Amino acid sequence: MKNNIKTSNNRQGTSYKARGYAGYLFLVACTFCLALAGCKIYKFTEAGGLPAYVKTINVRYIENKAQYINPQLSPRLSDKLRQKVMSQTRLTVTNVDNEDADLDVRGFITDYRFSTSAISGQQVATNRLTVSVHIIILNRKAEDNNEPNEAKKEYDISRSFEFKGNQSFQQAEADLGDEIIRTLTDEIFNKLFSNW
């Protein structure tokens, strides 16, 4: 009788282990599928992200019209956006002065400001840097392809970046510089190519 109970428990234990392993495999498969689906958001080399008639793009210099100006932000953001468009789309990036590109992307930094985000014991615990960009997309081929509503789109993008209260603004700008450029570039890119 004792042997039967042990055997029964062993089988049950094995059954639980098998179910646990199957569940683990199912989770891995789901994660893999979601990861593949997530990659589609950033890969616009297929016609699904843009109308097929759009072949060229002009990414203009993003001007800085904020009250406080970080002199490195505009050139770095403009360059990074051009590079991302070149490497992750099927579009040909044209010369900045070209007025004949199918898509014309321009924009300007509207806000760049520091504020206190948390106080602890009458001391500043964390500060925040907020950066906002206004983007304008002109689609020169929209009218020819009976899509007048697609001729001009405008978007506002705003992101905040936290940093320690004991850091100076200059230190925060230096530490956050790469993250700011990467985040804003990704946000602008997604606005450009995900809403067609």
Image (spheres, grey):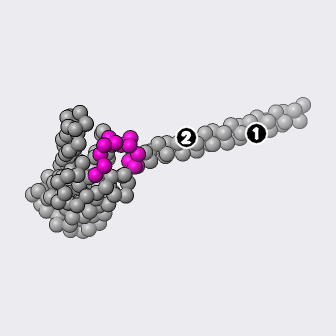
Residue drawn at x 29%, y 66% is 175
Residue drawn at x 23%, y 52% is 101
Q: x%, y% of residue 194?
A: 33, 42
Asked where in the image residue 51 lies, by quadrant, the reply is top left
Tag 2 secondary structure: helix
* Nearest the eye: 161 or 3: 161
Residue position for label 2: 30
Q: x%, y% of residue 3?
A: 89, 36
* Placement of the C terminus among the 4 image quadrants: top left
Residues rendered magenta in the picture: 43-56
- The amino acid beneath tag 2 is Cys
Q: x%, y% of residue 106?
A: 18, 52
* Nearest the eye: 52 or 163: 52
State the separation of the CA atoms marked 1 and 2.
24 Å
Residue drawn at x 23%, y 55% is 58
Marking on residue 138: none
Quick check: 176 left or right of 152? Answer: right
Residue at the extreme left of the image, as rendered: 67
Q: Does the rendering let one see residue 22?
A: yes
- The amino acid beneath tag 1 is Thr
Q: Does the rendering let one see residue 179?
A: no
Residue position for label 1: 14
Quick check: 78 left or right of 69? Answer: right
Quick check: 139 left or right of 43? Answer: left
* Placement of the N terminus among the 4 image quadrants: top right
Magenta part mainly helix, strand or loop?
A: loop
Q: Which is in the foreground here, disc 1 or disc 2? A: 2
Asked where in the image residue 139 lies, by quadrant, the reply is top left
Tag 1 secondary structure: helix
Quick check: 109 left or right of 86? Answer: left
